[in-house]
Image: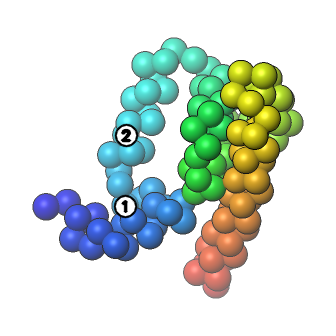
Amino acid sequence: MSSHMENPQESLQGLAQGDFSMLDALKDLVAVSYVESGLDPQTFMLVRMAALATLDAAPASWFMNLAAGAGADLAREQVLGTLIAIAPVIGTARVVSAAGHILKALVLAEKAAETSAEDGQ
């Protein structure tokens, strides 16, 4: 039995808070999809951002993807530009919702950084 199945409540709570470390399968899935897409890192992440907005993804999903986007040198302006570009297709309500989720994801990032700093001391 995999370790995340031993304590599913803890795993689900971690996922809801943006901690995918418990589920290596998710990380592997993203890595494989990146390689198979043939896209450069920025385009890959912008496509993912568009999909997140379309699906009205939770802040934890935005948190993980924004962190990966930062690793791909993706600027917040590019994320905003992507939301503006897809607004006529997915609707303004989804874009406004995405903006709110992004702001919540940034709060999650701040909390994660604080926790990391406290653990390092």
Residue 50's x, y, as percent?
A: 66, 30
Q: Is residue 79 left or right of residue 52?
A: right
60 displayed left or right of 12: right
Crowd class of label 2 (few under 14; some 14 to 19; many from 20; radius 10 Å): few
Residue depicted at 75% across the width and 40% down the height: 93
Determine the image quadrant of residue 51. Answer: top right
Q: Nearer the viewer, residue 1 or 70?
A: 1
Residue at 57% of width from left, 17% of height from top?
39
Q: Do the numbered discs 1 and 2 sit on residues whose CB atoms are within 8 Å?
A: no
**Amino acid at dot 1:** Met
How many callouts does the rendering have?
2
x then y, percent, for residue 57: 58, 46
Residue under the point 45% across and 67% down: 14
> x and y percent of residue 18 in the render?
54, 60
Instruction: Kindly identify which numbered label has been placed on residue 49.
Output: none
For this rendering, which residue is in front, 55 or 102? 55
Q: Dot 1, how many residues are within 10 Å of its Cα: few (below 14), some (14-19), or many (20+)?
A: some
The residue beneath circle 2 is 28
The amino acid pointed to by label 2 is Asp
Eyeballing the image, is 120 above or below 24? below
Q: Tell me the residue at 44%/34% (across/down).
A: 31
Pinpoint residue 28: horizontal percent, then vertical percent. Answer: 37, 40
Image quarter for residue 52?
A: top right
* Dot placed on the residue nearer the N-terminal end, 1 or 2: 1
Q: Residues under labels 1 and 2: Cα distance?
A: 12 Å
Residue nearest the viewer, comparing 13 with 71: 13
Q: Secondary structure at mark 1?
A: helix
Q: Is residue 118 left or right of residue 33?
A: right
Q: Can residue 70 be seen from the camera position used here?
A: no
Q: Circle 1 sits on which residue? A: 22
The C terminus: image quadrant: bottom right
Q: Quadrant of residue 26?
A: top left
